[in-house]
Amino acid sequence: MIIQIAKHSGFCYGVKRAIQILDDLIEANKGEKRIFTLGPIIHNNQVTEYYEEKGIKAIEKLANFMDNRMDGDRLVIRSHGAPKSVYDLAEAQGFEIHDATCPYVKKIQNTVSSYYLKGYNIIIVGDQNHPEVLGINGWCDESATIVNTLHDVEDMHPSDELFCIVAQTTFKLSLWEQMSTLFSEKLSNAVIQNTICLATEQRQKACIELSKTVEFMIVIGGKHSSNTRKLAEICSRNATTIHIETKDDLVDVSMFKSNTKIGIAAGASTPDWIVESVILKIENEGEVFFDGKS
């Protein structure tokens, strides 16, 4: 077997930064105060479990936690960001806030807020249930129209009103490009900003290139991770693709024959140690030539 790892796999800048902020806070805190994250710090179950073992609790909805609050509680805003209302509530309730929002997401929040205050209608391209999108929508009083497919845009009526259009950072680049063309045709006064993260673009393009040269693609990352699911979808167009969270999901390694070419890609929230453990499992159950990063 020959194994190649796609370029730009694993933790992106925003995820590394969020993890570092939480680790630094844990170190400085020395167990003195309770630390909470607003939802899991990143979309990876293994990372969430690691921090739970360190006593870090994830709060899904801050409003439901008020009766449990204690003076000095520390709240970490996760990498996906949060609505403005969360910051306002946390500050009013006396939380010490540590903002681990990805800088690329924060930029979208600021863009949406600025244009909304100027009277623009906001359109967010992305998954309406994703925490990043929910957070962005919270910076325009939750007034945004959220679209996710070409069909959504095709159903829109032509308009000469003011619009500002942004994208979820992990949205599929090829679909965004198609949707942008349609927006331009339908909305005569639209500011269209490609806010897909550069790392997302690089990751998706690298997966396309690698998947064209191998027989199998193993995409490693959380089942709830938007960017990982998109990588699996992209890879499946060119090669047989398996989406796993950990080595334990890779049950039947016997499918990989001695001359099989295997590509490995990892989502933006997947730690290196999980990727390495998958490679070790394949190595231990077959003869492998490791070709490094593609």
Image: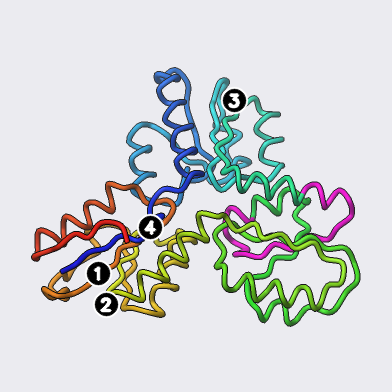
Q: Which residues are magenta?
A: 113-133
CA distance separating discs 2 and 3: 50 Å
Q: Which residue is mark 4?
A: 7
Q: Which three-letter amino acid code belongs to the residue tagged 3?
A: Glu
Whether pointer 2 and pointer 4 mark residues with C-beta atoms closer than 8 Å, the reply is no
The image quarter in which residue 242 lies:
bottom left
Q: Are marks 1 and 2 in contact (CB under 8 Å)?
A: yes
- Residue bearing the label numbered 1: 262
- Which of the two discs, 4 and 3, sits closer to the camera? 4
Amino acid of disc 1: Ile
Identify the residue shown where x is 37% and y is 37%: 51
Q: Is residue 40 left or right of residue 221?
A: right
- x then y, percent, for residue 239: 33, 78
Of the two numbered discs 2 and 4 on the same chain, state the one appearing first in sequence. 4
* First in sequence: mark 1 vs mark 2: 2
Give 112 or 85, whichever is nearer the viewer. Answer: 112
User: Helix, strand, or loop for circle 4?
Assistant: loop
Please name which of the two marks, 1 or 3, marks the residue nearer to the observer.
1
Give the residue type at disc 4.
Lys
Q: CA distance from mark 4 to mark 3?
A: 38 Å
- Residue found at x 71% / y 50%: 138
- Tell me: residue 256, above or below residue 82: below
Secondary structure, mark 3, is strand
Residue assigned mark 3? 96
- The dot on residue 215 is 2
Q: Earlier in the sequence, mark 2 or mark 3?
A: 3
Q: Amino acid at mark 2?
A: Glu
Q: Disc 2 vs disc 4: which is toward the camera?
A: 4
The residue at the point 60 percent across, 58 percent down is 196
Rounded to the nearest angstrom, the CA distance separating label 2 from label 4 is 18 Å
119 inside magenta stretch: yes
